[in-house]
Amino acid sequence: MIYLDYQATTPLAPEARAAMLPWLEGPEGIGFANPHSPHRAGRAAVAAVEVAREQVAALLPPGGRVVFTGSATEALNLAIFGCGAKSFAVSTIEHAAVLDTVEARGGACHMLACTRDGLVPADAPIPAGTGLVAVMQVNNEIGTIQPVDMLVQAAHDAGALFLCDAVQGAGKIAPPEQADMIALSAHKLYGPKGIGALWIRDGIELAPQIHGGGQEQGLRSGTLSPALCAGFGAAAALAKARMEQDAAHVEDLWNRARDLMAGWTLNGSADQRWHGNLNLRREGLDVARLMSDLRDIAFSAGSACASGSGRPSHVLTAIGLDAAAAKSSVRIGFGRYTKLSELEDACARLEAAAAAQGVYS
């Protein structure tokens, strides 16, 4: 299997796996202990959690705190429901974890349109009275990097808080320095599934959405997994240490893939983009048939969270594509562990399979 779906999830880094294993041991070891217990084993577990918290915080701006959650989706829910805002401004290309949560929260919602390049304009007007603005850092479907710093300033000028879904950008590019809340996910930066985090700027108070024992600074009741926290922390530390190296590798892969698939049309900006995301279309392409013909290549027809819905991507329609063009698009995602030879093989086979459908450059 050639794995080219890094936006859906990334491979677990060996270093993250190694960090997790001691906290899965038992009964001889103490790694299975509850980190909220006062005995020695519990204190050792909570110490591991706090080390991981510091490692994750090192990817984020100073002047805030990290709250561990079960996922980035939970982190976004905590921010949207917990901040108490009654009116929102969100981009049309947000992940469903934002769009659906804002809809469930209720209240006025102003949609911030994007350009055909997949970018929210930096001067997008924020309506007076808006309580929370939510714009993602890197789009999960087309990889475009939003002008978050300027949008934060516009939000603050309007008296609103700013929430940034940094799931696709965390550990890969610099964090959104001025955001008020930032959501991230371990399994999108080579960590384990089942854990995310919400960074909250100092001075911002949120109402808890999960009640019980008052863990996680009173914001997220429930027993933390030291193993998941340790894996997340190790992955975050590795991402920070390798950020330039990983980016250089991704750039080499991007350039080669663009050369090999020159006859395909790129969806979204080529420049304002994380180059580990290559979203392409070919007129008349039957993507379902393409995926069936290439079952040993893992790529995507859009967001993994929306796969199987039968609807065209809301991101691709938001940048002006009609349903046919949206449904003739594929997403190829690569990263740290992608080999150049694998990518070259996959691109050649994608080209051949498209040609077999009668779809040519």
Image (cartoon, helix red, strand yellow):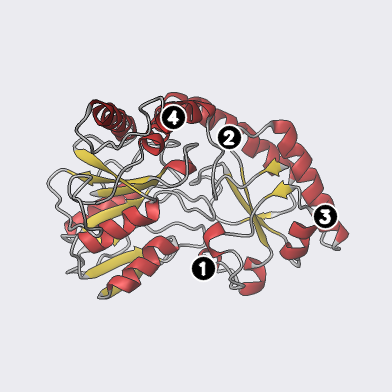
For the C terminus, the quadrant is bottom right
Which residue is identified by label 4? 25
Q: Is residue 103 visible?
A: yes
Residue 211 location (% of width, % of height):
22, 58
Q: 27 or 103, which is in the foreground?
A: 27
Residue furthest bottom as drawn: 107
Q: Position of residue 357 (x, y in %)?
A: 85, 63
Q: Dividing the picture into quarters, in which one does residue 158 lie?
A: bottom left
Identify the residue under disc 2.
250
Check disc 3 and give the amino acid type: Ala
Residues at discs 3 and 2 in contact (Cβ within 8 Å): no
| Along the line of sight, the residue nearer the viewer: 185 or 21 | 21
- Farthest front residue in view: 27
Q: Amino acid at mark 4?
A: Glu
The answer to which quarter of the image holds residue 91 is bottom left
Q: Earlier in the sequence, mark 3 or mark 2?
A: 2
For the residues labelled 1 and 3, the Cα–Cα distance comes to: 26 Å
345 vs 187, left or right, is right
